[in-house]
Amino acid sequence: MRTSAGSDVEQLPRSALRELQSERLRSVFGIELEALAEAPFTSKAALREAYPFGLLRVPVSSLARVHASSGTHGKPTVVGYTRADLEVWTELMARCMTMAGVQPGMLVHNANTYGLFTGGHGFHQGAERIGATVIPVSGGFTARQAMLLRDLGGQVLVSTPSYALVIAQAVRDAGIDPSSLSLELGLFGGEPWTDGLRAEIERELPGLRAVNFYGLSEMCGPGVATECLPVRDGLHVNEDHFLVEVVDPETGSVLEEGSEGELVFTTLTKEAMPLLRYRTGDIGSLTFEPCECGRTFARIRGLRGRRDDMLIIRGVNIYPSNVEYLLLSVEDVAPHYQLVVTRPGAMDELLVQCEPASVDVNVEGLRERVETLLREHTGIRIPVEVLEPGGVQRSEGKAVRVVDRRAAS
Ligand code: DLL
């Protein structure tokens, strides 16, 4: 049974969970769990080479659905689902949304885009399965989002974290008092975000508690790992369906619990497109400590974002989430920013663009404060440009944090 404290399988002792995983791994890939570390990886490049359907284990005609990732780095990654795959995904979304506090009868305002992106349909299916009421608003038409939140009284907002802030702004622009809305929960994911951004969203939308959802199309979409509402310390991986490892991004060797590295997943129940040791490119760490909520599944901590988004500026590694963390600790900064990368000579240069929280802020003083903070924390001088309020491009889905102008410079 699905309860907020977790179903039986979510509370399995780890030895029983390992047995279940061993069985499933053997039946899908013919590999013993003990020998997993020697099994080959599957890379994103392999998926790209097989574009669009080369990695399917079933005929295209037996697929019930196709989705795709947004493909910020080239062609989209196309994934297929059999009926059974859709059923597992729906059940996992119901489990994750229950874990995040969604209850039957709640009104779910789904502002994730419906389409190839898994975020729209995934949350829709989960909400229906729980017995909640879905409002399939999809992304975009932001002024209308605000009106519908007020008029229909959504209690659960589903979107990317960056778009939640855009919606909050639209609420204020429409002259609606955000605390008059019925929002109780925010289910956010699809892009990296820091605790600072979480605090910002919860301040902008009072009454809402924000919960982190992680996933990727190649596994199923959202539904891979989620925080539990009462603890919100790490994202519980649905380990009965996905094996998770953290590996050294350079050598590929499996890292110990707690070490930061690249997340690698193996599907244990996928029919259409099973993937063995899939290298996500996402950086984080794992803990196998049981959670205070009672769940025993591994938790992902310190999700920083994709290694591809890591910039090396004068020898210093910088993730957009590092910049977000620092920026949001500065008073008078709005939670909108972009990192502009150029290559004027042989080396990459970075410019951080941000916005003041209001028109009354002394822009020059703010620029100096942010530059000082960045220098103190990175050891290098990173120029900052404070744009006008609204000057940083807003997104209706995943925010574009890195603007790559290296080819043009
Ligand atoms: O973004 C699935 C999803 C939708 C998850 C909505 C959660 C909510 P893709 O479009 O294939 O699938 O993109 C997957 O997005 O490899 C990460 O780099 C990033 N990502 C997703 N969720 C998070 C998160 C969906 N909570 C890629 N924190 C992943 C950090 C995230 N990064």
Image (cartoon, rainbow, N blue to C red):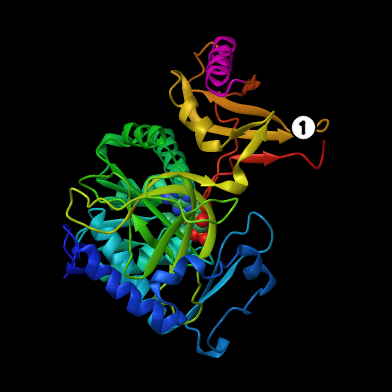
Q: Nearer the viewer, residue 226 or 310?
A: 310
Residue at 17% from the left image edge and 55% from the top image edge: 294
Residue 319 position within the rendered picture, expressed as x and y whole percent measured from the top left: 56, 37
User: Is residue 197 shown left or right of residue 106?
Assistant: right
The quadrant holding residue 96 is bottom left
Residue 173 position within the rendered picture, expressed as x and y whole percent measured from the top left: 44, 34
Task: From the image, give the main secondary structure of the stretch colored magenta.
Answer: helix
Q: Is residue 366 magenta?
A: yes
Residue 141 position within the rendered picture, expressed as x and y whole percent measured from the top left: 50, 50
Residue at 40% from the left image edge and 50% from the top image edge: 256
**In the image, the residue with mark 1 has its CB under 8 Å from the nearest atom of ligand 1:** no
Residue at 56% from the left image edge and 89% from the top image edge: 59
Mark 1 is on which residue type? Answer: Met
**Tag 1 secondary structure:** loop
Residue position for label 1: 347
Image quarter (top left, top right, bottom left or bottom right) of the N terminus: bottom left
Q: How crowded is mark 1: few (under 14 residues within 10 Å), some or many (20 or more)?
A: few
- 397, above or below 91, in the image: above
Residue 112 visible in rendering: no
Magenta residues span 363-379
Residue 317 visible in rendering: yes
Residue at 18% from the left image edge and 51% from the top image edge: 293
Q: Does the magenta stretch include residue 222?
A: no
Q: Nearer the viewer, residue 396 or 331?
A: 331
- 159, above or below 342, in the image: below
- 134, above or below 362, in the image: below
